[in-house]
Amino acid sequence: MKVLPEDVRPYKKTPVFTEETVPPGLLRQHTTKEGAWAKIVVLEGRLLYRILAPEVSETVLTPDRWGVVEPQVPHEVSPDGPVRFFVEFHRVPGE
């Protein structure tokens, strides 16, 4: 699993989503903006996180395991039953 670079800092956070309130755009292929990293934090339950390029991989995120989204890398998520999670966006300060 990827890790956030040491020089990035959080700048925005989504509301907490559930399996019923997750925006449809997160359930299909999408990317972050140039220079934007993201941390997917699961508060309860399980969330499937799929990286779609350059190599396809799937990871189950839980409260003990969060996911990292690299800038502009196609990905999607899928609830695995009841879940509560949020996404925190990071970037290098000043960029």
Image (tube, rainbow, N blue to C red):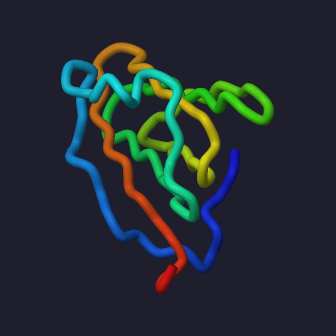
Residue 14 as seen in the image, left or right of residue 26 = left
The residue at the point 65 percent across, 25 percent down is: 58
The residue at the point 45 percent across, 45 percent down is: 40
Residue 47 image offset from top left, x and y in percent: 44, 27
Q: Quadrant of residue 52?
A: top right
In the orientation shown, which residue stands out farthest toward the bottom? Answer: 94
Residue 95 as seen in the image, left or right of residue 17 = right
Q: Quadrant of the N terminus?
A: top right
Residue 32 as seen in the image, left or right of residue 22 = right
Residue 86 image offset from top left, x and y in percent: 32, 45
Q: Is residue 27 above or below residue 65?
A: above
Residue 20 as seen in the image, left or right of residue 1 = left
The residue at the point 50 percent across, 70 percent down is: 91
**Viewer-proximal residue among 87 and 44:** 87
Q: Quadrant of residue 74?
A: top right
Residue 27 image offset from top left, x and y in percent: 41, 22
**Viewer-proximal residue among 80 and 88:** 88
Residue 13 image offset from top left, x and y in percent: 30, 57
In the orientation shown, which residue stands out farthest toward the right? Answer: 55
In the orientation shown, which residue stands out farthest toward the top? Answer: 81
Q: Is residue 52 above or below residue 31?
A: above
Q: Quadrant of residue 11?
A: bottom left
